[in-house]
Image (spheres, helix red, strand yellow):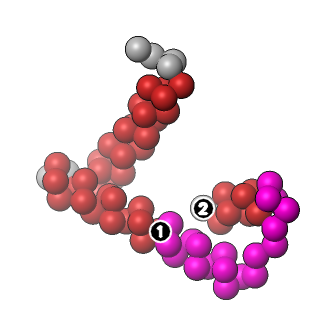
Amino acid sequence: MVSHLEWVQALSGLFWEEEQVNTELEKKMVKSFKQVWDVAARRKVPFRCAAYLIAIERIAEVYRYRGIFP
């Protein structure tokens, strides 16, 4: 995730201090954990399966959005 944040910085021509990087990282980690927790509880599956389900849903959404598959 930090590599992604560094990539975003480079694209935007920004430089973030370590504190800001850590803040952004924490926000993303907390949000991701809550999503996995919710899916695991709702679908009654282990966290690993919940994370896979979220990933597959995200990929499917991109395919639907880009019109790759009907």
What secondary structure prevails in the magenta region? Answer: helix
Amino acid at the residue labelled 1: Met
Looking at this view, is 46 or 57 the one in front? 57
Q: Position of residue 66 (x, y in %)?
A: 53, 25
Q: Which quadrant of the figure contains the C terminus?
A: top left
Q: Which mark is residue 1?
A: 2
On the picture, is 5 further left or further right than 37? right
Number of residues whose C-alpha sits closer than 10 Å to that of mark 1, classed few (under 14), some (14–19) or many (20 or more): few
Residue 50, above or below 57: below
Q: Tell me where residue 21 sits by quadrant.
A: bottom right
On the picture, is 69 further left or further right than 37? right
Q: Residue furthest top?
A: 70
Q: Position of residue 69 (x, y in %)?
A: 45, 16
Looking at this view, is 46 or 10 the one in front? 10
Q: Dot 2 lies on which element?
A: loop
On the picture, is 56 further left or further right than 9? left
On the picture, is 44 further left or further right than 51? left
Looking at this view, is 29 or 16 the one in front? 16
Q: Tell me where residue 40 sits by quadrant.
A: bottom left
Q: Dot 1 lies on which element?
A: helix
Q: Tell me where residue 20 sits by quadrant.
A: bottom right
Q: CA distance from mark 1 to mark 2?
A: 9 Å
User: Which stretch did the figure color magenta?
Assistant: 10-28
Q: Are marks 1 and 2 in contact (CB under 8 Å)?
A: yes
Q: Position of residue 67 (x, y in %)?
A: 50, 19
Is 31 in the magenta?
A: no
Does label 1 or label 2 sit earlier along the sequence? 2
Q: Position of residue 11 (x, y in %)?
A: 80, 54
Q: Label 1: which residue?
A: 29
